[in-house]
Image (cartoon, grey):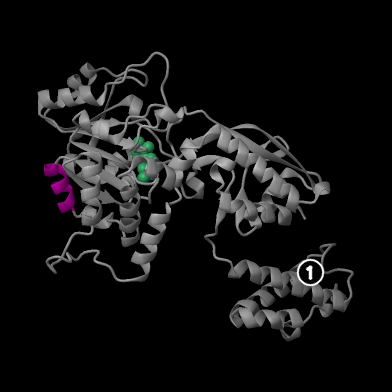
Amino acid sequence: MEKSLRQLPSVDEVLRNARITAMLENHPRMVILEAVRAVLASARKEVLSGAAAGFQGINKKECLELVVEKTAAMVRCSVQTNLRRVINATGIILHTNLGRAPLCEGAKEAIKMAATNYSNLELDLKTGRRGSRYAAVEGLLTSLIGAEDALVVNNNAAAVLLALSTLAKGQEIIVSRGQLVEIGGSFRIPEVMAQSGAKLVEVGATNKTYPEDYKKAICRETALLLHVHTSNYRIVGFTRETTVEELVQIGKEYNLPVMSDQGSGCLLDLSGFSLPQEPTVREVLKAGPDIVTFSGDKLLGGPQAGIILGKGIYIEKMKKNPLTRAVRIDKMTVAALEATLREYRDEEKAIQEIPTLQMLTAGQEVLAKRAYHLRCLLEDVLDKNTVALTVEKGMSAVGGGAMPTAQLPSTVVTVNPCNKSIVELQAALRDGDPAVIGRIQGDRLVLDPRTISDTEFQLLAVALAGALK
Ligand SMILES: *Cc1c(COP(=O)(O)O)cnc(C)c1O
């Protein structure tokens, strides 16, 4: 043990090593020094604990080499940013863990402009007076979707919170038991509602809620009738949901506002692409609710945002609520949302330009062609002895709590590593830059071309080659 300890190099000895000196040219001295100290401390600990491997039973030169190797690895790790690019090979389009919707080119340019320059975020360039940060998107939203007024906040959870707090604080909201959804990360609609200071009155049963159930619950304290689109699950079979139209009727009868939380916020009818018939936000608004809310980064395919549309009197009230300041969107979101919404003025173009829509509507033939193309590229780059590749039928998913029953047939490439377990391959792929996340099926990794862009194919091949080494 004594001998092993004495063999460990000093900090100076490590810093004089040629590999480390070379690293000093590209990385801050602080970072390297910290790494050397950490590696030496852990080596000492390892020796003292009597661990059999590593620093025991090697000579002084080998010991220095090992320290240098570990230091280099640690420096590589610590200079990488924590937020890294990931190739999403899972086929799950709105993958919450991977950042939901990737943005269109126009949005990317708009973000760059807004982020790196000054902009007229809150300045009216016509009058030179103070303007509204929502002006850039309000007009587009109201004209595209057909609402009186609009407001955009940080996300849909914030939109629901703000709307309920403004319309029903200290009063009661009536909602169906079948619509008390959880939206991932244990984030539950009833809990968001409780935060608004309104009391939730649940009516009906999980599978059936009739208009009569709402009517019976209405009392002097009632401030709002709420409909929640169960966008991330479906109750099928013996069911009865009170529709937004029916709620609007009840609202008229009892002089109560009606709100619909649309969640996934679909702007286009995509049923022509073999996708489920989701009510579009425009259709929902036509049914006559006073307020509709939905996410910007689900089916809309834009940046994270919560969009509130509806009657001017209610939106005006929300704009004056101090909460609005706490949940306001930043300039990058304004820029990205405006650019994304502009694409929607031409539906065909929107489907071509907005990645989420493009991936949702990708045809089976195109996907099959792309899968074969991906396999070709992989065969070119990978060592045949390390891997077996196949092309077969598979299924993609919409994800992000949208269109839960959608069937998205795809063609996938499967990767069966010969020299590694599938768990080791996954870990190596996560460690790469870009990292690659695929789906696992038995002992094979499944790569679904639906969520991999053409420009990522080559990157993916290189990453896979590195991970299989
Ligand atoms: C996703 C969802 C939300 C939350 O939206 P975020 O933008 O993720 O905050 C709220 N309500 C419903 C019905 C949803 O599907």
Q: Is residue 323 magenta?
A: no
The answer to which of 411 and 45 lies nearer the viewer is: 411
In which quadrant will I find the C terminus? bottom right
Q: In which quadrant will I find the N terminus?
A: bottom right
Q: Where in the image, quadrant-wise, is ligand 1 located?
A: top left
On the question of residue 197 being in view, the answer is no
Instruction: Tell whether 109 sits left or right of 161.
Output: right
Q: Main secondary structure of the magenta part?
A: helix
Residue 292 in the image, given as x and y percentages of width and height: 25, 37
Q: Which residues are magenta?
A: 312-321
Badge 1 marks a residue whose secondary structure is helix
Residue 213: % across, % down: 23, 19
Label 1: few (<14), some or many (≥20) within 10 Å? few
Q: Is 401 positioned to the left or the right of 161 in the image?
A: right
Q: Name the residue nearer the viewer: 102 or 182.
A: 102
- The residue sitting at the top extreme is 238
Type of amino acid at the residue the image marks with label 1: Leu
Q: Is the residue 304 above or below the residue 167 in the image?
A: below
- Is 182 above or below relative to 452? above
Residue topped by disc 1: 48
Q: Is residue 314 magenta?
A: yes
Q: Nearer the viewer, residue 95 or 364?
A: 364
Q: Relative to 90, is 124 on the left or the right?
A: left
State the residue at coordinates (36%, 66%). 113
Q: Residue at x 66, y 74 (%)?
A: 35
Q: Determine whether 204 is above or below 432 in the image.
A: above
Q: Is residue 346 visible?
A: yes
Q: Residue at x 50, y 44 (%)?
A: 95
Is the CB–ligand 1 distance for label 1 below 8 Å? no
- Label total for image: 1
